[in-house]
Image (cartoon, grey):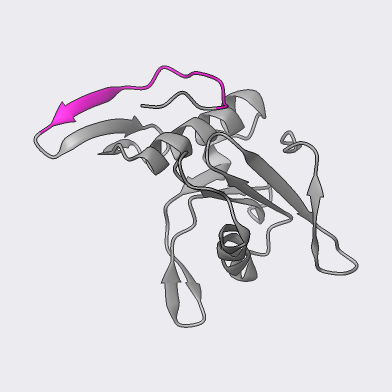
Amino acid sequence: MEELNLPRFPFKVKETENGRKIWDEFRKKYVVLTPEEWVRQHFLKFLNDYLKYPKSLLKTEFEIRYNQLKKRPDIVAYDNTGNPLMVVECKAPEVNISEATFQQAAIYNQTLKAKYMVITNGMDHFCCEQNEKTGTFDFVEKIPVYQS
């Protein structure tokens, strides 16, 4: 898999009859190793190991409802009261981050109402913070470290 603009982590990868799989320590199972999953696993570990988001407050690939549609955000980080703090949209490294990518994360956030949105393809990372007065999102320089 491709080298990312994130720290290196030792992952368990195995070959199966259905292709390569990577151990997801957050979901506690092997999942198919796609380029997007490679980014998702790196970013989960980055949030946990470097930015100190507790593993118990990181949730990945679960279903939410937006109007009548089923949606699956890549990563959601919660605060210590159980409220969504950050929604993360992951793309494969070869996917250019566009306005459509931000719109996808914004749709998830209509339901989640997280303070931060992060968009990453493993190479480029963008973080936005919701302006409480206007409801709009402003770019911030760094992804915030977890604070309890």
Residue 145 horizontal side relative to residue 119, left or right: right
* Residue shown at the point (22%, 32%) measured from the top left: 20
In the displayed structure, 104 sits above or below 46; it is below
Q: Position of residue 102 (x, y in %)?
A: 62, 59
Q: Nearer the viewer, residue 96 or 69?
A: 96
Residue 82 horizontal side relative to residue 128, left or right: left
* Residue shown at the point (47%, 38%) measured from the top left: 93
Q: Nearer the viewer, residue 65 or 101?
A: 101
The image quadrant of residue 58 is top right
The image quadrant of residue 7 is top right
Q: Position of residue 113 (x, y in %)?
A: 68, 64
Task: Point out the residue furthest to the left here.
Answer: 17
**Magenta stretch encompasses residue 42:** no
What's the magenta region? 5-16
Task: Point out the residue furthest to the right here.
Answer: 133
Q: Position of residue 109 (x, y in %)?
A: 63, 64
The image quadrant of residue 51 is top right
Q: Quadrant of the N terminus?
A: top left
Q: Nearer the viewer, residue 59 or 138?
A: 138
Report the number of discs.
0
Q: Nearer the viewer, residue 106 or 133?
A: 106
Q: Quadrant of the C terminus?
A: top right
Q: Position of residue 126 (x, y in %)?
A: 68, 44
Main secondary structure along the magenta-highlighted residues: loop
Residue 55 horizontal side relative to residue 52, left or right: left
* Residue shown at the point (42%, 63%) measured from the top left: 63
* Residue shown at the point (58%, 69%) measured from the top left: 107
